Amino acid sequence: QKEVEQNSGPLSVPEGAIASLNCTYSDRGSQSFFWYRQYSGKSPELIMSIYSNGDKEDGRFTAQLNKASQYVSLLIRDSQPSDSATYLCALRGGFQKLVFGTGTRLLVSP
Amino acid sequence: GAGVSQSPSNKVTEKGKDVELRCDPISGHTALYWYRQSLGQGLEFLIYFQGNSAPDKSGLPSDRFSAERTGGSVSTLTIQRTQQEDSAVYLCASSPQGLSNQPQHFGDGTRLSIL
C-alpha cells in the first residue's frame, strides 16, 4: 500500500460546481497535511495546509482532515476553468520531508 | 531573489555524462529539499539539508547521485554516469527551519532529459 493514495482522475466538473478531491494515507501517526496545485509544466504551489481534525477554509478552498479514518479532502467551491490542474496531496514524513500522492487531475469545463 | 531559483531550467545530455543541477533557496531558509518527478509519477523525495548537513539522504536512488550545500545556501545535485531512467524534473524546495508547520516552497525545477 502506498503511503498516500489519490485517484488519478481526471475529475471533470462544470464551471461553478464543487470539486471534491480525496486522499487517503497509511501512516496513522501523520500530523501535517498539505494540498499543492500543479499546472502542467509548472512547479507545485501550496494551496492549503491542515494539521487538526475538521475543516479549514480559505476563500473557495476547504480542506478536511479525518485522522481516525486517515483521509484528507479538498473542496473547491465555484470551480473555475483556471482551477484545472493536478492537485497533489502530501503529508510530512521523517525529517519533515513531504510524501506525495500521485495527484488527481481536475478538469473544469466552461 | 524572492523565490527558490533553479538552474538550468532544461538540460539535455547523453547517457553516461555527468550533470550538475543547482538550487538557490529563499534567502534565510535553512531547510532545503530535493525531489524528482518522473513522467506520470508523483514527487519523490531525494535528500534533505539542514544548513550544510544532510541528515536524510534516504531518497537518493543510487550512489551515482550526490548533493552538497555550501554556506547554508546554494545546493548542487550531481548525477554521475547518467542513465535514461534519470530523465525527470528535479525540484528543489526550501522552508525557514524545516519545522512541521512551515510549508515548503518549490522552485520551477530542472527538466533533465537523457538521450
Image: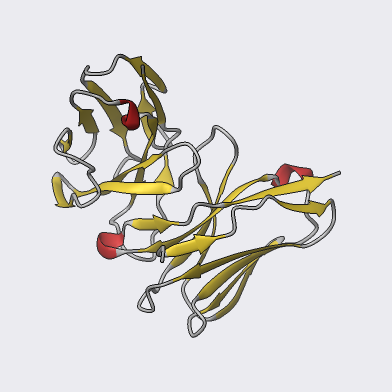
Q: Is residue A7 above or below residue B39?
A: below
Q: Residue at x 40, y 51 (%)?
A: B104
Q: Residue at x 24, y 24 (%)?
A: B82
Report x, y in % for residue A54: 58, 80
Residue B32 in view in this figure: no
Q: Residue at x 32, y 40 (%)?
A: B27
Residue B56 in view in this figure: yes
Q: Residue at x 31, y 33 (%)?
A: B24
Report x, y in % for residue A32: 42, 69
Q: Is residue B38 left or right of residue B23?
A: right
| Residue nearest the observer in this picture, A90 or B15 | B15
Q: Is residue B25 above or below residue A55?
A: above
| Residue nearest the observer in this picture, B89 or B6 | B89
Quarter of the image that includes the C terminus of chain B = top left
Report x, y in % for residue A74: 63, 64
| Residue nearest the observer in this picture, A49 or A92 | A92
**In which image quadrant can residue B84 be found?**
top left
Report x, y in % for residue B83: 27, 26
